[in-house]
Image (tube, rainbow, N blue to C red):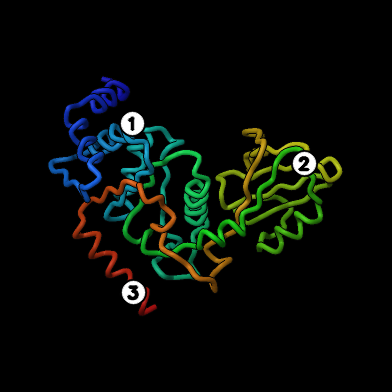
Amino acid sequence: MKIADLKTIYIKSPKTEKLYAQFTNFELSHVHLKGVLGSVASFIINGLYRKIPLNQLIILEDKESAAYFFNDLEKIAGAEKVLFFPNSYRNPYQVEDVDNANILQRAEVLNAIAKKNSNKFIVTYAEAITEKVVTKKNLKKSTTKINVGEEISLDFLIELLAEYDFEREDFVVEPGQFSVRGGIIDVFSFANENPYRIEFFGDDVESIRSFDPVSQLSIKEHKKITIIPNVQTSFLEETRESFLSFLPKNTLVWIKEVALIAHKINNAFEKAIIA
């Protein structure tokens, strides 16, 4: 039996219909599911999403479990709909030991939620959601939008990238870098998994495309893009807020092992206070 067949079975299942009815009862605060093993949870969550297309936050007990669930849900719901929200550091609360790949993923999630153009599945774990994020106001303030055909000074863009702590290099290989060659700027935003190549004709943006930093081959053309700096370190002195405050109020939240996750969150807050 194919995944598509299983998806249809779970979408049309009487149990999914019953769960849908429970969630549409606005007086109901929560639902407890029992006996959900293996990939069944992913099929149930995807089936419910088809009936209630809202943002869905799935909180697992640890990073390994979250990564496994993320891979599972990607195959069922589609990679474009599923996001992974990790913590920033290789070791919890070791600020000097950041992981750029994790920061990129966190920025991608914040950017996707802020756009509000489609609902997503967001898979995370206790350590990741206890780490506060940049405020919505500062995220918006630090987000640079560029459109094809827009008039913008090349020098202004270079100064802006430098102001946001992007490092000028000969070639971009990781987030937070940019390079300039004639009327072309390559920039690796913290909101996209691949860098952008922006070509200018005078002060007009002639074309934008994402490319592979290793092969230098183009991946996709874009009409508009957003460039975001490292929001995890750029606003260390600014007020931060809970990741949950980014989510719309009608977000569905799934939690596995509620007591265990609550215990881990409390421990994380205690460590943060001591640190």
Residue 229 falls in image quadrant: bottom right
Q: What is the residue that sits farthest to the left in this orientation?
A: 35
The front one of 38 and 30 is 30
Amino acid carrying label 2: it is Val
Residue 133 percent coordinates (x, y): 47, 62
Q: What is the residue that sits farthest to the right in this orientation?
A: 202
Q: Tell me the distance, in whole angstroms, between the alpha carbons under discs 2 and 3.
A: 48 Å
Image quadrant containing the C terminus: bottom left
Q: Residue at x 41, y 40 (%)?
A: 82
Could you tell whether 12 is left or right of 214 in the image?
left
Could you tell whether 105 is left or right of 121 in the image?
right
Label 3: state its secondary structure: helix
The front one of 184 and 149 is 149
Q: Tell me the distance, in whole angstroms, between the alpha carbons under discs 2 and 1.
A: 39 Å
Residue 27 percent coordinates (x, y): 21, 47
The front one of 238 and 53 is 53
Q: What is the residue that sits farthest to the front in this orientation?
A: 27
Image quadrant containing the N terminus: top left
Tag 2 and tag 1, C-beta contact below 8 Å: no
Q: Which residue is mark 2?
A: 205
Q: Which residue is mark 1?
A: 50
Residue 68 percent coordinates (x, y): 32, 44
Q: Residue at x 32, y 37 (%)?
A: 72
Disc number lying in front (3 or 1): 1
Q: Which residue is mark 3?
A: 271
For marks 3 and 1 on the same chain, the one whose residue lies earlier in the sequence:
1
Amino acid carrying label 3: it is Lys
Q: Tell me the distance, in whole angstroms, between the alpha carbons under discs 3 and 1.
A: 39 Å
